[in-house]
Amino acid sequence: MAWLQLSLESTRESAERLSELLERYGAISVSLSALSDEPLFGQDMDENVILWDRTRVSALLHEDIDLDTLLVCLNNRVGAVNILKHRIDLLQDKDWVNAYQQGQGPKIFSERLFICPSWCTPPDDTKYHIILDPGLAFGTGSHDTTAMCLDWLAGHDINCKLVIDYGCGSGILALAALCLGAQHAFAIDIDPQALQATRANAELNHLLARITIAHPDGVTLPAVNVLLANVLLSPLKELAPILSRLVLPGGDIVLSGLLETEAEECLAAYQSWFNMEKPVYRREWSLLHGVRKFIDI
């Protein structure tokens, strides 16, 4: 059996509506991707869905669907002016799950730490690996911000240290720290789905006994040797006094989730408490590292 892929070029205002309509009209899956290059990360994001000015809406459809009728319905519902272009491709049937898994292998960080999906066997010559599948919670090591944090962890001595992963997502940074020898990790997030994913990943890696997984309002956190926060500029600035108190004198703070253009602004928010190093950049993203001063502010 073959499948049809319908790709629509849409405006920001209509992309989400198109996605909803395609699902209602029987699409097997719908995805949104960028056609314009503005970033969606920043301090003014609210709870509303924010999309690109020009967004591609791609739908996987059954081969026997009446495309002419579908396109007429979409034009009537969202207005022809909001569907700038469309394209139809015929996709031959194959084992999509297997094809996806074949493209997802182990990732290595600082030539020491491996992140492996469950369908891969970790390399025999490393003791530092965790099993983690792509899921709903952010964080598999693919994104540059997560990768930079993992590289930092794998490149430093974490043995016997206490670690906080603030905004843990999938729990990948907390689990990596434990794998590298941390005594205990605290995985903190406001999203219940992230906490659920972290717990499942900790159980999969037999690390539940050494991790505390909690909402920030549901736990009293100690001051630790290492604190990592891979979130966004706005919460990082707002949380600066809180996160600073959670790092022991001489301890490390690692901050990411920042665009290159946001690094200096975030650095300024933390330099009262930390001796901040120069930002590290990877493509358009940045990572900050600082060492906690021995005097309090």
Image: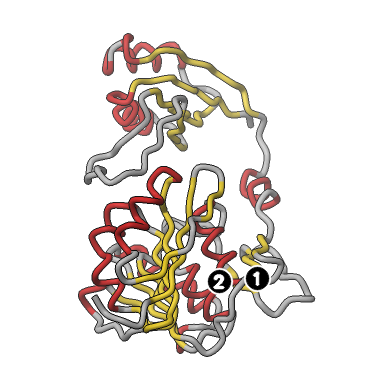
Q: Quadrant of the C terminus?
A: bottom left
> Are dots 2 and 1 in contact, CB under 8 Å?
yes
Relative placement, left or right, of 60 versus 53 is: right
Residue at mark 2 to residue at mark 1: CA–CA distance: 9 Å
Three-letter amino acid code of the residue under disc 2? Leu
Residue placed most toward the observer, 246 or 270: 270
Q: Nearer the viewer, mark 2 or mark 1?
A: 2
Residue 83 % position (x, y): 37, 15
- Residue at the (20%, 74%) spot, across then down: 217
Q: Residue furthest right?
A: 125
- Residue at the (54%, 26%) spot, across then down: 5
Residue placed most toward the observer, 190 or 278: 278
Residue 186 % position (x, y): 38, 79
- Residue at the (43%, 27%) spot, across then down: 57
Q: Is residue 56 above or below residue 273?
A: above
Residue placed most toward the observer, 236 or 64: 236
Q: Residue furthest front?
A: 295
Residue 239 % position (x, y): 25, 64
**SS state under label 1:** strand
**Which residue corresponds to mark 1?**
113
**SS state under label 2:** helix
Label 1 crowd bin: few (<14), some (14–19), many (20+), radius 10 Å: many
Q: Is residue 162 above or below residue 71?
A: below
Q: Which mark is residue 153?
A: 2
Three-letter amino acid code of the residue under disc 1? Leu
Relative placement, left or right, of 296 versus 184 is: left
Marked residue nearer the N-terminal end (2 or 1)? 1
